[in-house]
Image (cartoon, rainbow, N blue to C red):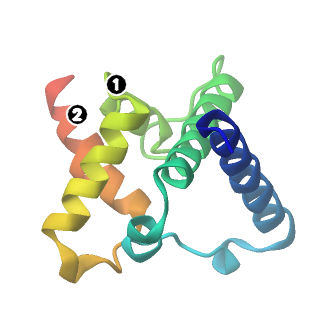
Amino acid sequence: MTAKRQLRTGIFLACLTLGVMWGNAGAADIPVVTGEQWTASSPEVQKAYLIGIANLIQVETAYYAKNPPKDAQNFVPRLAKGLRGQTLDSVREGLNRWYAANPDRLQRPVLETIWFEIAVPGLQKHK
């Protein structure tokens, strides 16, 4: 299987999984992806996960374009600003480095790691 096809398959499966989870589960029932799943995933699956997050940011940004919520009501605008200048690969590599340097913290959710280790420092740079 070619890398492009593997990536497409990974993206499709990630989107399908997210759609099923959000369509059938309450917020408390949505599984949280942690460093354990992240470090056990292939680069293609990791990219698919990040593409899913990027798509959610884009959809929410477009949805609220004319009437954005205040920062206190929504962290997406701050997340987008904090990730400005990052690429899928730079975020993926940053996560891989962080989990490799902190093997005792593999229970930490990936989204939390993105926020505190990549987005918050990015916000400091883009003040």
Q: Nearer the viewer, residue 8 or 108?
A: 8
Image-quadrant location for residue 87? top left
Q: How many marks are shown on the rendered structure?
A: 2
| 87 over 104 or under it: above or below | above
Which numbered marker is on residue 84? Answer: 1
For disc 2, the marked residue is 122
- In the image, taking residue 104 as reference, residue 37 lies left or right, namely right
- Give the residue type at disc 1: Arg
Secondary structure, mark 1, is loop
Quadrant where the C terminus sits is: top left
User: Crowdedness of circle 2 by 10 Å Cα count: few (<14), some, many (20+)?
Assistant: many
| 91 or 8, nearer to the observer | 8
Residue at horizontal 21%, vertical 22%? 126
Q: Do tag 1 and tag 2 residues touch (Cβ < 8 Å)?
A: yes
Q: Residues within 10 Å of mark 1 (few under 14, many from 20)?
A: some
> If you read the primary sequence from the N terminus, does the residue marked by circle 1 or circle 2 appear first?
1
- In front here: 73 or 118? 118
Residue 30 horizontal/vertical position (percent): 66, 73
The residue sitting at 63% across, 41% down in the picture is 7
- Judged left or right of residue 48, residue 15 is right
**Identity of the residue drawn at 35% across and 80% down:** 107
The CA span between labels 1 and 2 is: 7 Å
Residue 103 screen position, x and y as percent: 20, 77
- Residue projecting furthest to the top: 66
| Left or right of 105 on screen, residue 57 | right
Q: Who's the residue at 37% across and 71% down the image?
A: 35
Q: Position of residue 28 (x, y in %)?
A: 65, 79
The tag on residue 100 is: none
